[in-house]
């Protein structure tokens, strides 16, 4: 007999961490009601449900642990399972349209309180291979076009222009070495700068060794960067919207070099700015577990690469699972029973994290005194609250609107200001123009005016930042590869793990050192094809970023290209 509620083999209630969710309809989530734990500092503990077997009994037992506030969201799908509409807890609705081939065609957003929808994406055009040729953003009157090499199908350039005055906001040109590694990138939308008798172009170049590991990178940076090694205690938190100090045209070239041991561990990172002394960071690993134990601070003498007793100033102790229990700028790092980072002590700040189904859903920060900050993550919707002595002083809502490649726009709305409700909240639309990695390089308003611009060193440290100081907007949090960097810890949150930028001195492995590197899972996938280490490194460098901390995802180039070539090679 058919189930009248269509819940056959589906979970109606799930108790993950601090939330309760309801899902139905043939495996596709059509609605959910989420509740958070009352205590934002508590670890997940659902042992109170152990002796209950019915949904009603479990709900009654869980009620004292959960806040009364319910965050409801819903979505609709077409017959192919594609999302047609998504409604966030604030009532905002995002609608998606598709073309005859099934590709995304249009995106509209009806923001909270609006009477009509705003067209975000007016049109997306594709070539015969299904790759994007152009995307027109109606909301801010910009158009982004893509060009590919007709012989090898590699991305050649990404160009974004503002319709109102035909100004070029982005002009990224890519060149590759013979095997397809990115050899240089030039942005002709940025002006060449002349500083200290040197020509400083907006261009980056990259060199690789025989195993396709990055060994040298050149680019430009602000003159205030790079002369002195950033230590772990000097991680710039980007907690204000202040651009880099003094003259924004004070730019210079830099060269950053990397050396590796026989198994791929970093030995040294050397940063050499033009006209500066630069710095060298050295790494030290355990002889019995290959775990990072220390990195050198400025002034440290060179020590052995492998040692079970540290000889450098910056140390990284581990627990039995290989997780860091402290870092030079964090006195304590506590992990839960499934190795999720639950608590950090950073100076006078206590930072707590809570998760649901493997996803972070809350960050709670206790500052010295009586100030707390809380950020709640509910899918594409976020809620930020700042309290002083328990009184709500500031509140922001953030809505992420994405297409099939990543975030298009972040709409941020202040609802409480200085303890008072904002009578008519108005959203600030921050459109993100990304590069081939999905990194948010340029942010523009709904009129196409530039909010911020940023260039990165390899692996995510900020080389150069500009911010329009006339605009009152929260600091940019979603940056390198489009992922959030926590202001308090300096760590990038990549869902399954936290990844530091190289400013901290830590390689891009994540914080659980049982796993050899960030690319472990993509490497495993590639290893299944019987590839050598050099070949795996090549395809990983070309195609993959690990935004979720686990599974490799391609940015502008399809993994299908690799598979097709591999299949053709095997057949030949």
Image (cartoon, grey):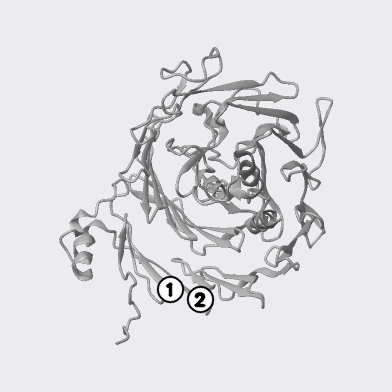
Separation of marks 1 and 2 at Cα, in angstroms:
8 Å
- Residue 556 in view in this figure: no
Q: Nearer the viewer, residue 266 or 296?
A: 266
Residue at 41 percent of width and 76 percent of height: 26
In this view, 465 is above or below 164: above
In this view, 301 is above or below 521: above
Q: Is residue 25 left or right of residue 563?
A: left
Q: Is residue 275 left or right of residue 328?
A: right
Q: Nearer the viewer, residue 123 or 182?
A: 182
Provide the secondary structure element on which disc 1 rests.
loop
Q: Quadrant of the C terminus?
A: bottom right
Provide the secondary structure element on which disc 2 rests.
strand
Around disc 2, counting alpha carbons within 10 Å, would you say few (fewer than 14), some (14 to 19), or many (20 or more)?
Answer: some
Residue at 48 percent of width and 20 percent of height: 306
Residue at 55 percent of width and 47 percent of height: 527
The residue lying furthest to the top in this view is: 301
Disc number for residue 170: none
Query: Badge 1 is on which residue?
Result: 30
**Callout 1 touching callout 2 (CB < 8 Å):** yes
Q: Earlier in the sequence, mark 1 or mark 2?
A: 1
Q: Nearer the viewer, residue 217 or 425?
A: 217
In percent of width and height, residue 176 lies at 76, 44
Query: Badge 2 is on which residue?
Result: 77
Residue at 68 percent of width and 34 percent of height: 210
- Residue 521 in view in this figure: yes
Q: Quadrant of the N terminus?
A: bottom left
């Amino acid at each position: 007999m058919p189930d009248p509620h269509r819940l056959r083999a589906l979970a109606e209630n799930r108790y993950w961490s601090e939330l309760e969710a309801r899902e139905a309809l043939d495996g596709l989530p059509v609605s959910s009601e989420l509740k958070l734990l009352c205590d934002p500092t508590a670890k997940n503990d659902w042992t109170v449900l152990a002796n209950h077997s019915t949904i009603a009994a479990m709900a009654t037992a869980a009620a004292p642990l959960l806040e009364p506030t319910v965050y409801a969201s819903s979505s609709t799908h077409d017959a192919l399972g594609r999302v047609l509409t998504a409604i966030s807890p604030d009532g905002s609705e995002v609608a998606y349209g598709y073309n005859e081939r099934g590709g995304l065609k249009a995106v509209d957003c009806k923001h909270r309180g609006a009477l009509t929808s705003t067209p975000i994406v007016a049109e997306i055009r594709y070539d015969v291979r299904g790759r994007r040729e152009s995307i027109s953003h109606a909301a801010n009157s910009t158009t982004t076009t893509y060009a590919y090499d007709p012989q090898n199908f590699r991305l050649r350039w990404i160009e974004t222009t503002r319709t109102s005055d035909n100004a070029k906001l982005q002009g990224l040109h890519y060149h590759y070495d013979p095997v397809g590694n990115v050899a240089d990138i030039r942005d002709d939308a940025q002006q060449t700068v002349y500083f200290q008798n040197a020509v400083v172009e907006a261009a980056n170049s990259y060199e690789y060794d025989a195993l396709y590991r990055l060994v040298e990178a050149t680019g430009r940076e602000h003159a205030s960067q790079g002369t002195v090694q950033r230590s772990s205690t000097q991680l710039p938190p980007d907690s204000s919207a202040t651009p880099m100090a003094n003259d924004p045209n004070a730019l210079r070239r830099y060269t950053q070099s990397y050396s590796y041991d026989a198994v791929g561990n970093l030995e040294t990172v050397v940063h050499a700015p033009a006209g500066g002394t630069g710095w060298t960071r050295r790494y030290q690993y355990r002889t019995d577990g290959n775990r990072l134990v220390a990195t050198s601070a400025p002034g440290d003498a060179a020590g052995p690469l492998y040692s079970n007793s540290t000889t450098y100033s910056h140390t990284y102790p581990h627990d039995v699972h290989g997780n860091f229990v402290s870092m030079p700028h964090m006195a304590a790092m506590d992990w839960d029973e499934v190795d999720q980072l639950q608590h950090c002590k950073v100076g006078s700040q206590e930072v707590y994290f809570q998760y649901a189904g493997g996803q972070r859903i809350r960050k709670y920060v206790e500052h010295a005194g009586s100030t707390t900050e809380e950020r709640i993550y509910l899918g594409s919707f976020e809620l930020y609250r700042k309290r002083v002595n328990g009184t709500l002083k500031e509140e922001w809502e953030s809505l992420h609107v994405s297409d099939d490649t990543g975030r298009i726009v972040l709409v941020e709305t202040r609802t409480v200001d200085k303890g008072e409700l904002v009578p008519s909240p108005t959203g600030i639309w921050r459109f993100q123009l990304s590069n081939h990695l999905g990194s948010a390089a340029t942010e523009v308003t709904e009129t196409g005016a530039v909010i911020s611009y940023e260039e990165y060193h390899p692996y995510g440290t900020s080389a150069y930042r500009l911010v329009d100081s006339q605009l009152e907007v929260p600091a940019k949090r979603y940056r390198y590869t489009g992922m959030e960097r926590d202001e308090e810890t300096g760590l990038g949150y990549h869902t399954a793990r936290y990844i530091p930028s190289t400013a901290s001195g830590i390689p891009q492995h994540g914080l659980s050192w049982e796993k050899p590197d960030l690319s472990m899972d993509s490497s495993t996938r590639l290893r299944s094809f019987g590839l050598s280490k050099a070949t795996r490194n090549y395809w990983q460098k070309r195609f993959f970023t690990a935004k979720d901390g686990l599974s490799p995802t391609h940015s502008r180039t399809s993994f299908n290209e690799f598979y097709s070539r591999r299949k053709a090679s095997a057949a030949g």
